[in-house]
Image (cartoon, rainbow, N blue to C red):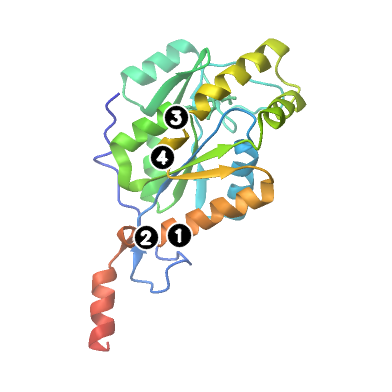
């Protein structure tokens, strides 16, 4: 799918605490977390959002039914297949894919708006969506794949949720193997043995990626002034 991010604003945030000089501003980045269901990605995402004021979640649309405990417009925007098709036709989705038997997509406008306000955006999307973003916004994308520590633990976590039937759990275990084959397409790989350690790992990735030379705008002027002693 052709996704154009050509008009995406270059984000800048003068109050960013990871950059010392106020006149060196930073481009926002898109942080993607992918994993098979049950590897802990949702828990990691929630903890990251709690600990990082500059990070906002991209809320996907989906045609799948709402699960117990989920909230519309918070976990997902739950929409009909007709509405999904309309959004695809109108090019309102930054990426979209069929995952299992349902459709998912990332609404374009909220992401562009957040990046324009200098925020970093967190995406919980699968490998297909990640590839689409990579093809269209490589420089702004940081991708992390979360692996479960073992197959046994993955199955235990899927069952512990108690939300899906045996048939759904079995199907997802099967799909997990496929999903995991995409790990080499990601920038960073985390084996989620312990949530807190995994969250700290993603925070370290985020801290380093925010300091990348290409993301800090105005550095040349800043260094020139340093050299001139101004
Ligand atoms: P679940 O139905 O369990 O919430 O999610 C199933 C899978 O769909 C997960 O791997 C999740 O990352 C992926 N997913 C959720 N939202 C999107 C989206 O907007 N785009 C894509 N490509 N995948 C998504």
- The N terminus, quarter of image: top left
Q: How many neighbours does mark 2 have within 10 angstroms: few (below 14), some (14-19), or many (20 or more)?
A: few
- The C terminus, quarter of image: bottom left
Q: Earlier in the sequence, mark 4 or mark 3?
A: 4
Q: Nearer the viewer, residue 98 or 230?
A: 98
Residue, disc 1: 208
Residue, disc 3: 127
Residues tagged 4 and 3 counted as in contact (Cβ below 8 A): no
Tell me residue 31's x, y (percent): 46, 45
Q: CA distance from mark 1 to mark 4?
A: 22 Å
Q: Residue at x 35, y 30 (%)?
A: 132
Residue, disc 4: 111
Q: CA distance from mark 1 to mark 3?
A: 23 Å
Q: Is mark 1 within 8 Å of ligand 1?
A: no
Vertical placement of residue 5 versus 27, above or below:
above
Q: CA distance from mark 4 to mark 3?
A: 18 Å
Vertical placement of residue 1 versus 30, above or below:
above
Q: How many neighbours does mark 1 have within 10 angstroms: few (below 14), some (14-19), or many (20 or more)?
A: few
Q: Earlier in the sequence, mark 1 or mark 3?
A: 3
Q: Earlier in the sequence, mark 3 or mark 2?
A: 3
96 with respect to 36 (left or right): left
Q: CA distance from mark 2 to mark 1?
A: 7 Å
Residues tagged 1 and 4 counted as in contact (Cβ below 8 A): no
Residues tagged 2 and 1 counted as in contact (Cβ below 8 A): yes
Residue 212 - label: 2
């Amino acid at each position: 799918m052709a996704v154009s991010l050509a008009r995406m604003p270059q984000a800048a945030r003068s109050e960013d605490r990871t950059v010392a000089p106020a006149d060196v501003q930073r481009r926002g980045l898109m942080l993607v977390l992918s994993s098979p269901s049950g590897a802990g990605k949702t828990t990691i995402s929630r903890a990251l959002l709690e600990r990082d004021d500059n990070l906002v979640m991209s809320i996907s649309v989906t045609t799948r039914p709402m699960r117990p405990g989920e909230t519309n417009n918070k976990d997902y925007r739950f929409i009909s297949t007709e509405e999904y098709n309309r959004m695809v036709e109108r090019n309102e989705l930054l990426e979209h894919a069929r995952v299992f038997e349902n459709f998912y997509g990332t609404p374009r406008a909220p992401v562009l708006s957040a990046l324009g306000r200098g925020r970093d955006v967190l995406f919980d999307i699968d490998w297909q969506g990640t590839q689409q973003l990579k093809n269209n916004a490589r420089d702004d994308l940081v991708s992390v794949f979360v692996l479960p520590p073992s197959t046994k633990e993955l199955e235990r976590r899927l069952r512990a949720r108690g939300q899906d039937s045996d048939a759904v759990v079995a199907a997802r275990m099967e799909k997990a193997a496929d999903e995991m084959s995409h790990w080499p397409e990601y920038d960073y790989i985390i084996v989620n043995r312990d949530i807190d350690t995994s969250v700290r790992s993603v925070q370290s990735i985020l801290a380093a990626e925010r300091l990348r030379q290409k993301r800090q705008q105005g550095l040349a002027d800043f260094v020139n002034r340093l050299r001139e002693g101004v």
